[in-house]
Structures are given as C-alpha cells and as structure tokens.
Amino acid sequence: MNWTELPDLAAVGLLAGAFASVARRNETRVSKVWLTGWVMIAVHFAAFLFMNAPGTWGTFFIIIGLAALTWAGTLFMWAAVPYRQENSSRLILISLFLTNTLYVSLMEIGTFPDWTINISAVLFGALPLAVGLATIRSVNNPIRWLVIGLYSSLSIFLLIFQHRPGNGGDLALNAVLFTVYFGCCLHFWFAYRRASAGAFVTIFGFLAWACVFVVAPSIQAFLPAIHVESGVWNLPKYLVAVGMILLQLEDQIEHNKHLALHDHLTGLPNRRLYQDRLAIALERARRYEAQAALLVVDLDRFKQVNDTLGHHVGDIVLQRVAALFSSRVRRSDTVARTGGDEFSIILEEPTSRADAMNVGRSLLQLLQEPLELGEHSVRIGASVGIAIYPEDAHEIEPLCIAADLRMYEAKHDAYEDQERETLSPVLPLSRLKKHAHADLQVVD
C-alpha cells in the first residue's frame, strides 16, 4: 500500500465532514454537488493507497483515482453553471464524465492502438460542441462556449503531444487535469464575482490546483535536483475546501440577513425594512424639496379565502398579489408586506398626488381579474389609503396614520355591501366606490 496517501485521505475526510456539517445547516442548490465532489476527492486518495498493487490491480486503482479526480472537478464546474438544470447541461456533464474516464483508462492501460486514443482525444471537444450547437436556441451562455473552447483546445493539445516519445503520456494526463481545474477556476470566477474571502480563496485555490499539473512536471523535467514533498502539491485542495466552507458561511449570513428584513412568504420587505426605506424616502424628499407618497392596501376578503378554501390557498393569494404589485411599480419604489393581508407602497420622486392615485387605481385593476389557483378561481377586492409628504404630514408616524385612516374610511364605506354578499369559494368582485379623501375609485 502507498501509505503516503493516508494522511491526505484523513485530512480530506475531515474537511468533507466539516463541509457536510455546514451544508446540512444551510442547504443550497450547490451544497450537495460540492459535497459529492469532495467524496470523489476522498475516493481519489483511497484508490491511490493501492496504486502500487501488482499487475492489473495497480492499473485499476490508478484509473479509479485519476477518474475520480476528474469527476470531482467536473462536478465543481457544473455546480457553478447557472443553467445546470437544463437537459443540455446534464448532457455535457455526462459527456465529460465519459470522455475523461475513457481517456484516462486508455492512457493507463497503454495497449490500445493509437487511433483509439486519437478518437478519445477528439471526443473531449466534439461532444460538448455537438451539444452546444444542437441546443444553441435554448441555451446560449458565455460559460457554455467557454467550456467548449477550453475542451476543444485540450483536444488539439492532446492530438499534438500525446504520442510524443518519452513523456507524451504524462503531458497528456496532466493537460486533462489542468483543463478540469482551470475550468473550475473560470467557472467560480463567473459565478462568485464578489469581494469576499470565500470567493477569493476558492478561485485562487482552483488556480493553484490547476497550476500543480504544470509546475510539478516542469520542476521534475527541468530542475530534477529540486525535491518537493508530495504533500505540498495537495495544499491547493485544502485551500479550495476552506474557501468553499467560507462561501457556504457567507451565503448563510446573507440568507439570515435577508430573512431578518424580508417576509418569508412573499419575499417582500417586512415592516422593519419598510420603516427604514420610508425614513430614507422622506429624508430624500425633504433634502430635495420633493414629494413622496405612501399607499396602504388592505385586501378586503382575505379572511373569507382562508375560511372557505384554507390557509394554503390564502398563502398562494398573498404571493400572487405581491408579484402583481411588484410588477406594477418602478424598481426605485418599494412594495412591502406590513401585515397579514396588508401591503404598503412607497412612491418616491418623481411623484404627485395624481400619480399616486393612478398607481392606486392600477393596483386595484390588477385584482379585477380572477386569480387562478389550481382548482380554484378567486376574486378579491381591496381598500386603498393614500398620504402624501409633505402635504398630509411631515414625519413618518403621522404620514402612516393618515394613510391608515383613509384606508379604513374606504373599507367602512364598503362594509354594508360586504354584509349582503354571499360567501363562496369563488369570491365576487366588489363594486366601485369613491375614496373618502379623493376621487380615487376603490375596489372594496
């Protein structure tokens, strides 16, 4: 047995365990793929424990070790692809698995004709290119063409150098591994363009990992007198593992910050973030002597939806209404969920009372059409209250009170009509009524 690989196997096992612990607490779309990649790295070290076994067993374990190393890098690349749920992305993943395994096997066994090795080298670039061209209408992303270009370059390099006398086979295998981990570096650079320790450590670690397959054979060929311990070449692996753990922790922190400031059901700003944005909006309006508008929208029959169709349908209604309202306002404005069935909208400059009334009308018009919720079709109404800074109030609390009072006035005007309406799974659309404060037609 090659006992020199045992410490590395133990270290990678511990890092994979730590990574699994972090991922379990905050599972993301990439955590399982990353964890599978690190399991492959552990398989790589475990197989290399038996690389000195006699005869075909030694060759078998070397093939498993090298193939697992390429599988890990390919998984890391695929995890960073934004469209990886597409079937074409899975096809490229499978093609790279197969070509890497086939090429490593042919090179290590060494008894196959040259033409078979040439075909396997061509497949590195040909298979991803074929998938990319066949699916160019559905997926045309720079990352995909980067992969195609990278592996096409690898095919050309292999065809030129793989049959070189002496060290051609070593050059070819190192080129394959360099391509895999340099591809990881490029993919993570595209996916994590942020100034954080996790991103920097991971990207630099993958770059160093790729360079190992260039620097190590270069030192061996041109500077044979320099002896470098084999453990040194494994340091980039640990750097990448630490970087990925940092990325997971950074994502978890950002997720917790988001949960603290956003409604978990609709994803809209919650009351805390809404109050902060309202304060900023009023301060900006005060500084530039401009206006700002606050709209309070309360769904009139949301309780009836919960009582007749269930809370799960009510949740879907809230999500649908949040999406409708967010699509109507400008990106500079704010839509927040400030109560169970209450939404608040902050309109910043340029705005006026007429603009706010138009927005209020349009929000209510969005609710005129039935909301199709699977087996149910639901119509809901709403009451709107509008307050304008600085006409109605100069501070946050009086402005909110003014908007709430006008919303309740509109709701009170519709109360008698609501009493006469019959409850049913399909809720009728309320009649139009005038706002008590202004000539805004309100669906209530």
Image: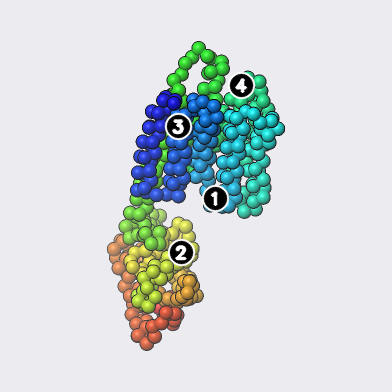
If you read the primary sequence from the N terminus, does the residue marked by circle 3 or circle 2 appear first? 3
If you read the primary sequence from the N terminus, does the residue marked by circle 2 or circle 4 appear first? 4
**Crowdedness of circle 1 by 10 Å Cα count: few (<14), some, many (20+)?**
some
Residue annotated with mark 2? 323
The colour scheme applied to this rendered structure is rainbow
Q: Is residue 387 above or below residue 54?
A: below
Q: Quadrant of the N terminus?
A: top left
* In this rendering, the label closer to the viewer, 4 or 3: 3
Residue annotated with mark 4? 167
Secondary structure of the residue carrying numbered label 3: helix
The residue shown at (42%, 65%) is 319
If you read the primary sequence from the N terminus, does the residue marked by circle 1 or circle 4 appear first? 1
Residue annotated with mark 3? 45
What is the x, y in percent for residue 183? 55, 37
- Between 116 and 433, the one lying in front of the other is 116
Q: Can I make out residue 202 in this image?
A: no
Residue annotated with mark 1? 83
Q: Amino acid at mark 1?
A: Tyr
What is the x, y in percent for residue 128? 63, 43
Query: Do the CB atoms of the residues marked 3 and 2 lie less than 8 Å apart?
Result: no
Query: Do the CB atoms of the residues marked 1 and 2 lie less than 8 Å apart?
Result: no
Cα distance between the residues tagged 2 and 4: 61 Å
Q: Amino acid at mark 2?
A: Ala
Cα distance between the residues tagged 1 and 2: 23 Å
**Crowdedness of circle 2 by 10 Å Cα count: few (<14), some, many (20+)?**
some
- Between 6 and 370, the one lying in front of the other is 6
